[in-house]
Amino acid sequence: MTVKNKSAVQGCQSRIWLEVDLDTLEQNFKRICSAVKPLKVMAVLKANAYGLGVMPIAERLLKAGADGFCVAELREAVQLKPFGKPIQILGGLMDFELEEAVRNQFILGITDYNSAKKISDESVRQGVTTEVHFKIDSGMGRLGILAKEAVATAKKVVKLPNLNCCGIYSHFPAAANDEASLAQASCILELSEKMESAGICLEKRHIANSDAINTCPFATVPPFTQVRAGINLHGSFNADGERELGLETIVSLKTRIVQIREMPAGHTIGYNRTCRLPVNTKVATIAAGYADGIPLNLSNRGYVVIRDRLCPIIGRISMDYTTVRLDGFEDDIQPGEEVILIGGAGSSRITVADWANLKGTHPYEVLCAIGPRVNRVYISKKGS
């Protein structure tokens, strides 16, 4: 593949770098669009596009036809403003964020009457109308209007000036093709119908996040109008989704060997001496550690890939370095050789999900934990 820009060339000389395949990103996006058609696809780019680098990701998705972007908070929205697409802030706003959020005409969530009143007051002050969607807590228990209070709250909110109350949305705590998720989706549609009967026309209805796009077909068809695609754009999600949509990973995390040594039997490796070598062993120290996002849980458990071969991690992972065994390698292997932390092929493939399983977490956290000193390299056959 060819590099997209100069930073990618520089990345080839980095100690540790994350390769992001923009062509596969676009392919994943188009497959999601096809799967949920005629619903629109809003790309969720919160937390710096889950740690991958928001601006190159947003630029490619814009070219691919994204209908808009969703983020968690104001600063993320401001960063995307120059792209000229609708931007929805999915979370709640702080009072000090209201002025800028309204001025930039972001789509805002109504989490209660008080939040609506503040948005209305600021919109009146600026002489603008702000698009707002009712955020319903249908089971997440985090933010939003409780379902039983939603219609009454909406009737009060629509009386406030300078608000365009045209949407309703919610979030699955555990998106699955089961009765609980079906009940949540039904709840949003029922509330929409009740509000419609009360004269409140909600043109936009959405509940499907990445997992739901993969597993909840009832949340990706009309009368819902859009879906929110986040981490599945990157090819990280549950196995059911992968089989259904054929999405592929867009990330590879790589580093280099710093030193290779023949270590004697009985020598200990790493902090707290959690590994003692039973025999003379060829050991490589690689230039990546937990500060770069390698989970500490991989200590004495995980693997890296060198020359298409799985090499076990030995000892406790340090902040800046990790040690691995080089069983069966010839003497031609040298410092500076490439090491794959996430990526590879066939039986020597390591995935984001593999790390998540060893860490006892989910792929979202693994990607977001990749550190800032890891160089992001964007790869595309299409060029700039």
Image: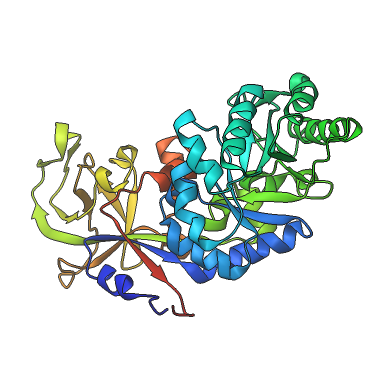
| Residue nearer the viewer, 346 or 230 | 230
In the displayed structure, does residue 29 sit left or right of residue 197?
left
For residue 149, above or below residue 231:
above
In the displayed structure, does residue 286 sit left or right of residue 86?
left
The answer to whether one can see residue 209 in this image is yes
For residue 173, above or below residue 384:
above
For residue 188, above or below residue 3:
above
| Residue nearer the viewer, 96 or 193 | 96
Residue furthest toward the right?
197
| Residue nearer the viewer, 374 or 63 | 63
* Number of numbered discs: 0
Residue at image location 19% in from the left, 61% down from the top = 257
For residue 311, above or below residue 21:
above
Q: How is the image coloured?
A: rainbow
| Residue nearer the viewer, 156 or 331 | 156
Residue 16: % across, % down: 26, 59
Picture quadrant of residue 52: bottom left
Picture quadrant of residue 66: bottom right
The answer to whether one can see residue 362 in this image is no
In the displayed structure, does residue 271 sit left or right of residue 49?
left
Q: Quadrant of the C terminus?
A: bottom left
Residue 176: % across, % down: 70, 38
Residue at image location 13% in from the left, 60% down from the top = 260
In the displayed structure, does residue 281 sit left or right of residue 43?
left
Residue 220: % across, % down: 76, 49
Q: Quadrant of the N terminus?
A: bottom left
Residue at image location 77% in from the left, 60% down from the top = 37
Residue at image location 21% in from the left, 41% down from the top = 315
